């Protein structure tokens, strides 16, 4: 069980930008002090930080200083070094743990995790060498999307394979790092749900529909254009995955919804998301307060969802 942290304690926040800004602002409103580790001196999150620290999220010296200043710590996304965090911080300092990063930083391990839970995911195969790609395409078929196994490499390292002519380009990418090849769906809807977990307490937010253009999130709506049965299934999946994750705090689940009504789990993502801001439209608590309550050992309120 997460240790109860009283107001007046210092929360260390790893990461910058709008998410860290909102996290620090919410922590301040809950009576906490904040120390923020962000990569640049001009980061917007420093406007709400009691103590600003400039440094990379994977820098040992910066993380060690953050650890020394913090009662409890949290990361705003998956772009952190889990092994380094586990080495520098105590379990009480890092209630979220780092196990979730094993799943979310590696596309192959994420697929294996979801597969083991009998989740419906898109067909995929691991591609290690340039010679593997032809066999992989024979297995998956066209169209298929080639993605680096390691996340965070950027969309320029992904390649949509539509015909045999694309295989040569794929072989060039595979000279750099291992990939997975995943079936590619057209005419899909993308939906997501925010989940808060603290021990046996689990709170599931509204189903949110997201609209993307060239991989960029353009709009989100809590009035998801999906069948009520799909919402029920999403909430069932969220509860099951939450049960199996060794994690405390907020995480999100993203899904593909095919035109024939088939639902696929797309990915797991630790920490708040921009589309999670919509929770304030459907409940009286933000995703940031839910996350902080979880890692501080405070009770999680029931969510009254207006879906």
Image (cartoon, rainbow, N blue to C red):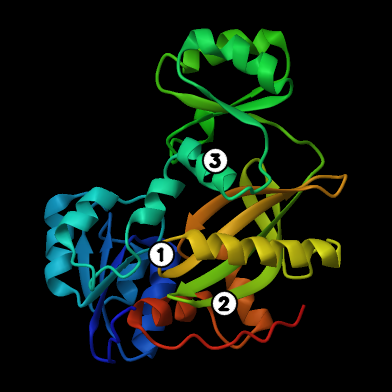
Q: Which residue is mark 2?
A: 203
Residue for point 62% across, 84% down: 303
> Residue 159 falls in which quadrant of the image?
top right
Residue at x 31% of width, y 70% of height: 95
Q: Position of residue 267 (x, y in %)?
A: 57, 49
Badge number at residue 247: 1
Mark 1 residue element: loop
Query: Above or below — where is 129 with respect to 199?
Result: above
Which of the image's four quarters has the C terminus? Answer: bottom right
Q: Is residue 59 left or right of residue 291?
A: left
Cα gap from disc 3 to disc 2, whole angstroms: 24 Å
Count residues near mark 3 (Cα–Cα under 10 Å), then give few for <14, some for 14-19, many for 20+. many
Image location of residue 83, percent across then percent down: 24, 49
> In terms of secondary structure, where does tag 2 sit?
strand
Q: Earlier in the sequence, mark 3 or mark 2?
A: 3
Q: Nearer the viewer, residue 66 or 243?
A: 243
Horizontal side of 180 relative to 23 (left or right) equals: right
Image mark for residue 175: none
Asked which quadrant contains residue 147, the reply is: top right
Does residue 109 sit above or below 293 in this rendering? above
Residue 108 visible in rendering: yes
Where does the image place residue 290, in percent across and percent down from the top left? 48, 79
Q: Is residue 273 visible?
A: no
Q: What residue is shown at x 48% (from left), y 17% (from top)?
A: 173
Residue at point 59% right, 87% down?
302
Relative to 95, say whether 86 is above or below: above
Q: Whole-Å distance between the Cαs marked 2 and 1?
A: 13 Å
Residue at the disc numbered 3:
111
Q: Say whether disc 2 or disc 1 marks the residue closer to the N-terminus.
A: 2
Q: Is residue 282 left or right of residue 114?
A: right
């Amino acid at each position: 069980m997460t240790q109860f942290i009283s107001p007046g304690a210092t929360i260390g926040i790893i990461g910058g930008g709008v998410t860290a800004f909102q996290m620090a602002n919410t922590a301040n409103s809950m009576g906490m002090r904040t120390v923020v580790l962000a990569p640049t001196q001009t980061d917007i999150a420093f406007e709400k930080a009691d103590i600003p620290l400039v440094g990379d999220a994977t820098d040992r010296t910066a993380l060690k200083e953050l650890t020394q200043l913090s009662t409890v710590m949290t990361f705003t996304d998956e772009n952190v070094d889990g092994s380094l965090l586990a080495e520098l911080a105590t379990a009480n300092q890092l209630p979220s743990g780092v196990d979730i990063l094993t799943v979310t930083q590696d596309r192959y391990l994420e697929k294996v995790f979801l597969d083991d839970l009998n989740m419906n995911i898109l067909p995929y195969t691991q591609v290690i060498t340039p010679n593997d790609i032809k066999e992989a395409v024979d297995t998956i078929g066209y169209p298929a999307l080639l993605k680096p196994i390691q996340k965070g490499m950027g969309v320029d390292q992904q390649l949509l394979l539509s015909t045999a002519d694309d295989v040569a380009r794929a072989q060039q990418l595979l000279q750099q790092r291992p990939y997975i090849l995943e079936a590619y769906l057209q005419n899909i809807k993308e939906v997501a749900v925010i989940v808060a977990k603290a021990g046996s307490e689990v709170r599931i937010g509204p189903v949110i529909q997201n609209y993307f253009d060239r991989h960029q999130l353009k709009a989100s709506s809590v009035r998801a254009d999906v069948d009520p049965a799909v919402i029920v299934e999403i909430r069932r999946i969220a509860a099951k995955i939450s049960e199996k994750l060794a994690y405390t705090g907020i995480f999100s689940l993203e899904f593909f919804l095919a035109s024939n009504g088939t639902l696929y789990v797309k990915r797991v993502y630790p920490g708040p998301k921009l589309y999670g801001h919509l929770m304030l439209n459907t409940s009286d608590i933000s995703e940031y307060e839910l996350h902080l309550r979880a890692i501080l050992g405070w009770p999680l309120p029931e969510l009254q969802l207006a879906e």
